[in-house]
Image (cartoon, rainbow, N blue to C red):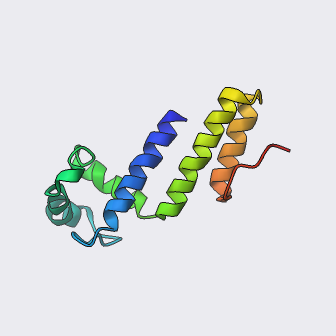
Amino acid sequence: LATMRNYISKLLVFRTMQLLPDPVFQKGMNARYFQDNYLPRLQKKNEFQEMLKGHPYALFMSFSKAAEYSCSTLKLWLEQLLLAEYRLKGSGLPERVVLEQLLISLLHGSSSLEQPR
C-alpha cells in the first residue's frame, strides 16, 4: 500500500503541475518537446526541484500517466488507500478482503470504500 500511495501522490503532484498557467502543459506532447521545452521551464520554478529530479524520459512517462487522471480522481484514490490502511490495522478483517475491496473500488472508480457486506 505504501508503494501505491507514493505512486499516486507523485501522480497527483505532477497532475497539479500540469494545471499551472506557465509553462502550459499540452496533453500528447512528445518526449523531445517535453525534455527540451516544458521540463526546463518547469524546473526554473524553485518549488518543484525535488519532484523533478530524475531521468527526463522517466519524468515524461510520469507526466503522461498523470495526464490521464483528474486531480479529484487521484485524491479519491489516496482517500481509499488511507481507509484500506486503517482497516488493515484496526478492523480485524482479513487482509485479503480489505485489499480485494480496495482494488475493486479503484478499478470501478467508486466514490468510497463501503463497509464489507
The quadrant in which the N terminus is found is: top right
Q: Is residue 28 left or right of residue 38?
A: right
Residue 34: image location, x then y, percent: 23, 63
Residue 89: image location, x then y, percent: 66, 27
Q: Is residue 86 visible?
A: yes
Residue 43: image location, x then y, percent: 17, 55
Question: At 59% across and 43% down in the image, what residue appears?
Answer: 81
Question: At 37% across and 53% down in the image, what residue appears?
Answer: 13
Question: At 17% across and 57% down in the image, what residue appears?
Answer: 45
Q: Quadrant of residue 6?
A: top left
Q: How many marks?
A: 0
Q: Is residue 9 left or right of residue 42?
A: right
Say if 10 sits above or below 24 in the image.
Answer: above
Q: Nearer the viewer, residue 20 or 67?
A: 20
The quadrant in which the C terminus is found is: top right
Q: Is residue 69 visible?
A: no
Q: Quadrant of residue 116?
A: top right
Question: At 54% across and 60% down in the image, what residue appears?
Answer: 73
Say if 27 sits above or below 97 in the image.
Answer: below
Q: Nearer the viewer, residue 31 or 12?
A: 12
In the picture as drawn, the residue positioned furthest to the right comes out as 117
Residue 59: image location, x then y, percent: 29, 51
Q: Is residue 101 left or right of residue 41?
A: right
Say if 60 sits above or below 115 in the image.
Answer: below
Q: Is residue 78 left or right of residue 62?
A: right
